[in-house]
Image: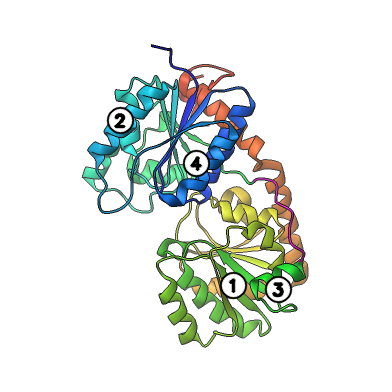
Amino acid sequence: MSEHSGTCLVSISYTRAGTEEVLLDLARCLVRDGEPVSAIVPGERALDGLANDLVAAGAVVVRAGRFFGEDVSLVRNVRDLRKALRALRPAVVHVHTPWVGIGKEAVVAAWLAGVPYRLRTEQNPVPDPLRLRQRLSLKLSDRLVQGISFVSSGNRESHLRHAGRPRRKCMVVPNAVRPAPEPRDRATARAELGLPLDALVAVMVGRLERRKGPLDFVRAAAVAAKAAPGLHFAIAGDGEMHVDIEAAIAAAGLEERIHLLGHRPNIRALLPAFDIFVQPSHYEGLSVAMLEALAAGLPMATTDVDGVAEVAPGGDGALIVPIGDTDALGEAVARLANDAELRRALANTTRRRIEREFTVEATYARYRRFYALATGKRGTPGTRRREFAR
């Protein structure tokens, strides 16, 4: 039987979003540097594109696992993942998880398959303390990994505080933003989206789910609309709250000023259509949508969620309000709408910071160091515990 070699990236997901793009970027960089790379991608059809892109990048891809839905079976997942990992025989398994506690089957399966090094990346914080049973389950899973990375310092602190993660294994590796695709010119993008050509437009980008705060965006828009009469608003995304959002817009009398754009897979190319980025989230790890908007030069009004402190330390480069304070968020949006010089100043500050600190190459270098610390090997998916906390 061959020796263990290379890295296997495991996607714990049911749809393609920022977490999956981070995994894909990591795979591309590892392959470029001559590492054998494999990936385990769940069988959901929404992930077919991710699987195809990983194959195109040079990774060996296995479709296995089902981590969301009513018929999830931990036992079946462990069995199927263990079988896949025994065939792939990687030296490192790196599990990318959107939620705390999800994906422990992959860690257990890697341990049962004899994979020498087992790592996790956590994309989202733990907003509230875990129940005892959850903490015990997570503690057992964490014993089987050599390293856990978090996408922002606030994200890591929430896990330490509310989930009891082992500090000696924890490291921060921020998400990254790719170089932007060729953007549409403003008039073309507006025409494609059905937006008025001359109005200022504030946009939120994200799934219509409670944690993203789409109802808060509508409430903030109602506040901003009064202080900035010419301002329009847009929501790029779809999800289970679509009907609720439509009802809230109608109740606010903003049907002519809030534009529902639906899911836009090419949203990065369309960002020149907008003037202000709004992040009304209740919690984030380090939003890739935020990084993309800031890289495109949009000024931001945001709630004080994890990841904001990384891109606008001390409030330098963004208007930041308390989570859930829709009046303050609306006032911040109106302030940006009414002050072109402020918009330019904030946008320039954050764009420079993104271009300097949140590139794919910068994040890849941090992941290489994470691998080195976890495996005890310098320079390879490659010193030791006390360095994780830095």
Q: CA distance from mark 3 to mark 4?
A: 32 Å
Which amino acid is tagged 1? Answer: Ala
Which amino acid is tagged 2? Answer: Val
Which residue has dot 2 on it?
Answer: 108
Q: Is residue 316 visible?
A: no
Report whether 107 appears left or right of 228: left
Which residue has dot 1 on it?
Answer: 234
Mark with earlier residue (3, 4): 4
Name above or below for residue 225 compared with residue 310.
below
Q: How many residues crowd mark 1 within 10 Å: few (<14), some (14–19), many (20+)? A: many
Mark with earlier residue (1, 4): 4
Contact between marks 3 and 2 (CB within 8 A): the answer is: no
Which residue has dot 4 on it?
Answer: 51
Q: Nearer the viewer, mark 3 or mark 2?
A: 3
Question: Which color mode does the image show?
Answer: rainbow
Which residue has dot 3 on it?
Answer: 191
Which amino acid is tagged 3? Answer: Ala
Q: Find the magenta span and give its range.
A: 178-185
Q: CA distance from mark 1 to mark 4?
A: 31 Å
Q: Nearer the viewer, residue 39 or 244?
A: 39
Residue 347: x, y in percent?
72, 59
Name above or below for residue 213 compared with residue 365.
below
Q: Nearer the viewer, mark 4 or mark 2?
A: 4
The mark tally for this picture is 4
Residue in the picture at 69% in, 53% down: 295
Residue 223: x, y in percent?
55, 80
Q: CA distance from mark 3 to mark 1?
A: 14 Å
Residue in the picture at 63% in, 46% down: 177
Q: CA distance from mark 2 to mark 1?
A: 43 Å
